[in-house]
Structures are given as structure tokens and as C-alpha cells.
């Protein structure tokens, strides 16, 4: 690694990361505070507040506003000190995992938010496993320390046990719950005191000269100081020191403690992302990998969002820039279709506000409005036929039949469903036998989201009904083998929105039978989002 050239300064200052957490751990609040410190918004909107004020900047779809959850992953760019942060928001809700998995292919690091009272929860664990698959560096923020939280060592042990990663404290809490008054910033030898009176005020910061400094007793009540000194001594003895190389290879996570709601500990975490987080990394691609310092531009689509602006039937493809320096108006080759496209109105996102992106560097995320030419997994380059690989598509775990309330509108329904399929919001299967569509999702809440979006965006009431099928598998093999298999199993065969053959199953027995009777066909639960 060390023999690679230095990155151009503009690229080296980029930090592209996602926040992963269990629902309710405080991710949206943390995102708000990041934007606040980045100067991107003046006043953080509280998720809990009523009515208008509740519409936090990073959640913009109607359904999210109604439910107070982040449904669609959006990207936000803002400057913080000398860095340019590109924060890719992942839906925290357990039902939106596939979108989340794909988002993690577009970032260089993840910030894991855990709730001080609950520790590591199931959803966090699932997301964390995806980060491990990609050796993503992880920085941890333990939130809600101003509420009753668990013992600090217990939280650290749980992360080490459950996630099999070394944890090193970057800060250490003083007091807990109602008595929580701040943290000792271990990395900078400072005492940070939380301001409970003003939630948007940056806390007081006091430079300390080691743990024996007399200043401690001026600021910290004796009973809290004694407990803190005991704990920090144990921590220094038992826990590993921060090793920047281990953080970058994903084997160690530094942990900061704080309260996002009270803007406390957030700035220290941001400094940590700048200092210890990775610069833009090499992207895995075929036939060769793409290095960020290459002068030619390349990028790949990791998400498509339709109807971000209900007044315009547009789709925005979110593109992670993998190399080079992009400028507006550039002609790029769409590798799958081999056609050139002039990128005249690329956008950068400040939550739901977009501005035209005059330029972008490797590591940045830009949105390219288009009418459906760009799909998840597509690569754009300055002419070379390179395709970024490793963007997964998962077999849905829940299948339902979808019908239009008005049978005359079946055509409109097909259009709406195809759009959601391209966006990656659902899998849509057209059975070769019989009529209608079968929609597959990874989590039950997605049916509700889809029904509400189809009604809102297309004016079509729809019904989802139970299906006899429980899962779907992509069929791989030679064309002859697939044709022969499909002819013999008509009732089970459907095509997905790319026209690929899918085998719909009712029981595990169906899958076992195929493996036994058709050795020249393989059934797969994932398919690479790489077309062409």
C-alpha cells in the first residue's frame, strides 16, 4: 500500500462514510448535529418535536415525515474544518436492509451509533457483519449517555464480544444518567463539560495536564472524580491503545461517548473521522481496480431514487465518484450500453436541497437526474470499459401478489412497479403463467411503503395479497438448460425486471428437488447488480 502516490489534496481531504445503527439509537439526531457543526444548517430540527419542526432535513419523503423514520438513503456533503465530509444516510429501519447493504458499497468507512442503555442490538449486528465483509473501518459513538446507561466497561465488552473487534476508548464518560457531566478526551487530554441548558451550544473544553492535574477537582465533584479515576486507570491498563493502522484495516474501533441530543461529543467524533477515518479508497472492478488518484473520471451507481421531486417525474442516480476530477458538462461513457452521456445537471445534496455540482472529486457522491437509463450497478467512465463489481442484490424474503384496485389500470401499475424495481426498492416478478405481478421485499414494512408511494406518486390504489410462494431464486446455467428447466416448471417461473429467469418456491423442498433433478442448473439467492 505504501508505494502508492499521494492523493491530490482535494481527494485526500474527502471522508465518505455512512452511519449505521439500530432504529432509535439516535442516528437522525447525530446526522443533524453533523450538519450543524458543518455549518450546513443553522438550527438542528429535533426529531421528537411536533409538526413542522419535526421535519428533519435528512428525511424528505412523505412517509418518513409521517412516521419519523428514515426510509430512503440520501447523501449529504458539507465541509468541516479542512475536510469535506460526504455522509451517506442509511435507512436505520430493519426492513430496509438491502438499500442499506448497497449504500455500504459506496462508502470508505462507517460510524456505528449505539444506545448507551441498550448496547449492541440485532440490527446493528447485521449491518456490522456487512462492514466486516468489506473490512470497512468503523468508528463508534455511544449515544444517550445523559440517560440511564449501562456500565462503560460492559458496553465495551459487549462490542468486543458480539462484533469481534478491538475497542479502544477515545473518550471516557464522567458520571452517568442524570449525573453525566461530560467526558475526558483521552486523545487530546481535555475535559469536555456538557451544557445541559442549551442543546445546540458547544460544550466547554478545558485543557488538562494529565490525570493528576489539580484542575480536575475544580470542575468535577469529588464522588464522580473518584469513580472516574478508578475506571480510567483500569481502562488504560486493560484496553488497547489507539493504533491508526488497525482502525484503517477494520480490526479496531475507537469509541467516543456523548449525547447527540445535547450536541455533546459530536465534534470530537467528527475530529476523529477526519483524523483516523480513511481517504477515498481503491474500488474493486473488472477487469482492473480503480484507484482514486487516476486522472480519468470513473464512478458507479449505488442507488436510484425516483420521484424525489413529485412535481417532476425524475429519477436521480446516486453516483459514487471512484477516480479523477469531474466537472459539470463532461461526457462520460455509460459502460453497459456503450453510449456516451453528457452530464449537464449533476446535483450535490444538502439533504433534500440540491444544488448544481460544478465539480466533484473521487470520494464525492453526486446525483445524476435521468429518465431511467441509469441503474444500480452501472459504471460511468471516460471511455474505458471498466465495471465496478460487488454490489449485491438479495433474494427477497417475503412475496405478495400485487393488483391494481382498478383492473383497467394494470398497465399503469406495471410502469410504477418497474420504476420501484429499478430503484432497488423491491423485486418485481412477472410470472410466465397467469397474470399479475409478484412483489418481493426484504421486510414487511416495505409493502406499506410501496403501497403508499404508488398511491401518492401514481394515483393508483393497490392491494397486496398473500402469495403461495415464499421465496425466489435466480436461475443460472446455459440458455438450453434454463429453457428446458423453465418449460418443465412453468407454474414456478417468473422474470425479474431485467428479464432474468427466476424460480419461485413454496418450500425448501422445491429447492432441494431442483438441485437433485436438474444438476446443470444452479439456484442463487443473490445476483450481482452488474448488467451487460
Image (cartoon, rainbow, N blue to C red):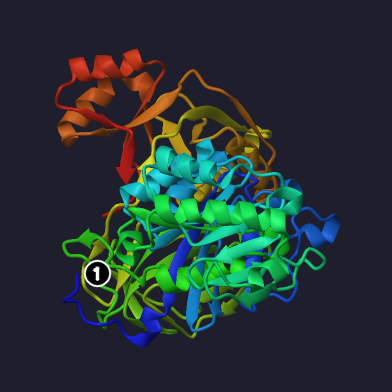
> On the image, which quarter does residue 319 sit in?
bottom left
- Quadrant (top left/top right/bottom left/bottom right) for the C terminus: bottom left
Residue at 36% over, 86% down = 9
Q: Is 502 placed left or right of 87 in the picture?
A: left
- Quadrant (top left/top right/bottom left/bottom right) for the N terminus: bottom left
Q: Position of residue 401 (x, y in %)?
A: 54, 28
Q: Position of residue 463 (x, y in %)?
A: 65, 31
* Circle 1 Cα neighbour tier, 10 Å, few/some/many (<14 / 14–19 / ≥20): many
Residue 366 appears in the rendering: no
Q: Secondary structure at mark 1?
A: loop
Residue at 41% over, 53% down = 237
**Foreground residue, 208 or 348?**
208
Question: Does residue 491 lie above or below 117 as drawn?
Answer: above
Question: Does residue 254 lie above or below 382 as drawn?
Answer: above
Q: Position of residue 112 (x, y in %)?
A: 50, 53
Residue 349 appears in the rendering: yes
Q: Is 254 placed left or right of 37 in the picture?
A: left
> On the image, which quarter does residue 136 sit in?
bottom left
Q: Which residue is mark 1?
A: 290
**Foreground residue, 467 or 507?**
507
Residue at 69% over, 45% down = 455
Question: Does residue 253 lie above or below 473 as drawn?
Answer: below
Q: Position of residue 300 (x, y in %)?
A: 36, 64
Number of numbered markers: 1
Amino acid at each position: 500500500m505504501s508505494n502508492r502516490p499521494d492523493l491530490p489534496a482535494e481527494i485526500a481531504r474527502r471522508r465518505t462514510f455512512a452511519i449505521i445503527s439500530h432504529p432509535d439509537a439516535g442516528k437522525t439526531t447525530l446526522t443533524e448535529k453533523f450538519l450543524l457543526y458543518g455549518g450546513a444548517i443553522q438550527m438542528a430540527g429535533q426529531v421528537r418535536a411536533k409538526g413542522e419542526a419535526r421535519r428533519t432535513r435528512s428525511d424528505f419523503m412523505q412517509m418518513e415525515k409521517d412516521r419519523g423514520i428514515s426510509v430512503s438513503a440520501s447523501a449529504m456533503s458539507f465541509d468541516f474544518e479542512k475536510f469535506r465530509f460526504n455522509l451517506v444516510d442509511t435507512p436505520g429501519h430493519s426492513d430496509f436492509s438491502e438499500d442499506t447493504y448497497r449504500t455500504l458499497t459506496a462508502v470508505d468507512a462507517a460510524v456505528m451509533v449505539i444506545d448507551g442503555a441498550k448496547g449492541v442490538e440485532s440490527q446493528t449486528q447485521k449491518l456490522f457483519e456487512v462492514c466486516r465483509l468489506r473490512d470497512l473501518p468503523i468508528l463508534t459513538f455511544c449515544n444517550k449517555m445523559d440517560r440511564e446507561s449501562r456500565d462503560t466497561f460492559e458496553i465495551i465488552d459487549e462490542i468486543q464480544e458480539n462484533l469481534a473487534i478491538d475497542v479502544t476508548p477515545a473518550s471516557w464518560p464522567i458520571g452517568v444518567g442524570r449525573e453525566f457531566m461530560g467526558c475526558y478526551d483521552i486523545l487530546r487530554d481535555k475535559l469536555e463539560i456538557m451544557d445541559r441548558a442549551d442543546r445546540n451550544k458547544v460544550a466547554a473544553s478545558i485543557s488538562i495536564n494529565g490525570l493528576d492535574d489539580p484542575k480536575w477537582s475544580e470542575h468535577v465533584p469529588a464522588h464522580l472524580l473518584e469513580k472516574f479515576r478508578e475506571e480510567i486507570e483500569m481502562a488504560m491498563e486493560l484496553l488497547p491503545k489507539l493504533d491508526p493502522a488497525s482502525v484503517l484495516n477494520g480490526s479496531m474501533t475507537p469509541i467516543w461517548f456523548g449525547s447527540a441530543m445535547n450536541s455533546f461529543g459530536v465534534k470530537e467524533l467528527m475530529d476523529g473521522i477526519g483524523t483516523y477515518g480513511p481517504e477515498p479508497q481503491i474500488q474493486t472492478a473488472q477487469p482492473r481496480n480503480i484507484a482514486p488518484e487516476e486522472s480519468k473520471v470513473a464512478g458507479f451507481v449505488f442507488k436510484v431514487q425516483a420521484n424525489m421531486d413529485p412535481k417532476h417525474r425524475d429519477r436521480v442516480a446516486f453516483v459514487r465518484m471512484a477516480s479523477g476530477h469531474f466537472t459539470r458538462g463532461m461526457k462520460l461513457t455509460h459502460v453497459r450500453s456503450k453510449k456516451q452521456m453528457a452530464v449537464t445537471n449533476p446535483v450535490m445534496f444538502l439533504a433534500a436541497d440540491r444544488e448544481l455540482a460544478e465539480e466533484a472529486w473521487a470520494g464525492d457522491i453526486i446525483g445524476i437526474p435521468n429518465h431511467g437509463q441509469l441503474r444500480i450497478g452501472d459504471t460511468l467512465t471516460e471511455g474505458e470499459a471498466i465495471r465496478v463489481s460487488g454490489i449485491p442484490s438479495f433474494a427477497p424474503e417475503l412475496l405478495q401478489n400485487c393488483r391494481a384496485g382498478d383492473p383497467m389500470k394494470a398497465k399503469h401499475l406495471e410502469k410504477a412497479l418497474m420504476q420501484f424495481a429499478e430503484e432497488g426498492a423491491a423485486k418485481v416478478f412477472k410470472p410466465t403463467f397467469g397474470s399479475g405481478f409478484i412483489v418481493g421485499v426484504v421486510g414487511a414494512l416495505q409493502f406499506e411503503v410501496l403501497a403508499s408511494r404508488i398511491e401518492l406518486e401514481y394515483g393508483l390504489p393497490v392491494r397486496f395479497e398473500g402469495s403461495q410462494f415464499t421465496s425466489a431464486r435466480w436461475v443460472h446455467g446455459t440458455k438450453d438448460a434454463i429453457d428446458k428447466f423453465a418449460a418443465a416448471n412453468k407454474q414456478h417461473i417468473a422474470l425479474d425486471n431485467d428479464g432474468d429467469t427466476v424460480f419461485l418456491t413454496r418450500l425448501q423442498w422445491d429447492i432441494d428437488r431442483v438441485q437433485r433433478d436438474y444438476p446443470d442448473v444452479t439456484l442463487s439467492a443473490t445476483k450481482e447488480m452488474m448488467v451487460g
